[in-house]
Image (spheres, grey):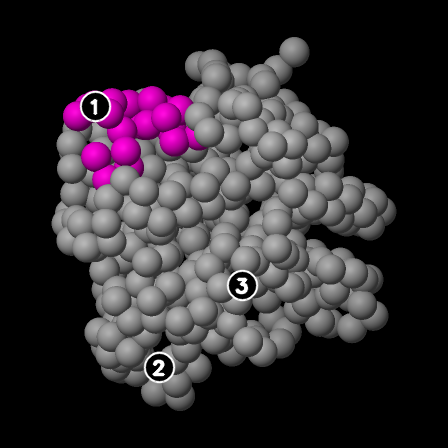
Amino acid sequence: MRALRAFSGYGIELEYMIVDCQTLSVLPVADELLQKLSGTRASEVRHGALAWSNELVLHLLELKNVNPVPEMESLPAAFQGEVQRINRLLEPMGARLMPGGMHPWMNPGTETRLWPHDNADIYRAYDRIFNCKRHGWANLQSMHLNLPFADDHEFARLHAAVRLLLPILPALSASSPIADGGNAGFLDFRMENYCTHQIRIPSTIGRVIPETATSRAAYEAEILAPMYEDIAVFDEEGILEHEWLNARGAVPRFDRNAIEIRVVDTQECPEANLAIAAAAVDVVRTLYNETCAPLAKQQVLDTDALIKIMRACIRDAERAVITDPVYLRLLGFPAQRCEARELWQHLIAPMTGSQPEQRKTWQNGLQTILEHGPLARRILLALGSDYSRTRLMAVYRELCECLEEGRMFLGMS
């Protein structure tokens, strides 16, 4: 199949938890649901242009479009319809889907159930080497955004643009402020855990913000080859020696000529996730086109500077203070200091102003996030100072209703 040109197709993957309808605790029945859908113990079941699948743990489901779509405007309604269909199938099982970047009180050490069917050898290897029964592995739900490239030239430009975007994405998408039944201290606690979840073998995750890459050959020699060499010490059978072992925040998938962005938490409904994806694509396209700065300047920005910004956004989301004038200049921001929300307001302005009709698809989701903060902020405001199980259940039950009904979370009535 001929590789797609940059920005000519998009792939979205959304992960959701299966929880008990009454208790909202995780329910490890993904295999039972997929069997109900397919009649076999398949790990992936297609339904039209979309597919449901499982990865790693039995309480997780992933929804994705099977083939890249030329525009994303059709996906919110398609994904929403699938969410409602799956909830109807889960209902007789006493289960439903829950959104969010993490389950608020799951104990991964005691509640994790690994997928025991096809690909189980992969998950057992991961568990043996990294210990998957912890946050960052068993308790996380994210969106993956796949952007295509056709050749080395497009890859270098796309990778440079994505690398600059990654640090500020948590400011828009953080949805995991609660863990172990209380305030986690980070608005994006999923990403806080993700940053170290494969640190036992540092080459497999790097520093999350990826190194500058200029070609496929260079990436394979400088990133993938050392990673495979390091994992071989722990994985003599070579079970994990694949490019998907690479856990950086954005990774090239040369098997399908796409860069996969991994730092976005799952939101309260598909509309919200797709709005964030659309905003991300707009920023990446602006950088790719060298509107604000040439490729060479984008590629030389120090990784340490990007990590500092990302860490602040993981902790404080939209209120993170960015004081790097070089970074802000690369993104076309007119000042030398700002909060992350001010930067996003600047970046999103073209999408929420007077634009063609298809752009209006994203206005509700983006304006809610800009005006009321990312979902993590809205969850904390809804909880106030009450982290009792009763209050947590009330807020997260409302989030489940938002997912079922396809609406943004605006607090508790």
> Which labelled disc corresponds to residue 335?
1
- The mark nearer the N terminus, 1 or 3, is 3
Residue 405, image quadrant: top right
> Residue 57: image x %, image y %?
56, 59
Q: Quadrant of the C terminus?
A: top right
| In the image, residue 37 above or below residue 209 | below
Point out the stretch of residues depicted in magenta: 329-348
Q: Which SS class for mark 3?
A: loop
> Which labelled disc corresponds to residue 235?
2
> Residue 225: image x %, image y %?
27, 79
| In the image, residue 349 above or below residue 296 | above
The residues tagged by marks 1 and 3 sit, at their Cα atoms, a distance apart of 44 Å
The three-letter amino acid code for the residue at tag 1 is Ala
**Residue drawn at point x = 45 percent, y = 69 percent:** 150
> Residue 255: image x %, image y %?
48, 75
Q: Residues within 10 Å of mark 2 (few under 14, many from 20)?
A: some
**Left or right of 191, for residue 143:** right
Asked if residue 39 is among those painted magenta in the image, a careful observer would answer no
The three-letter amino acid code for the residue at tag 2 is Asp
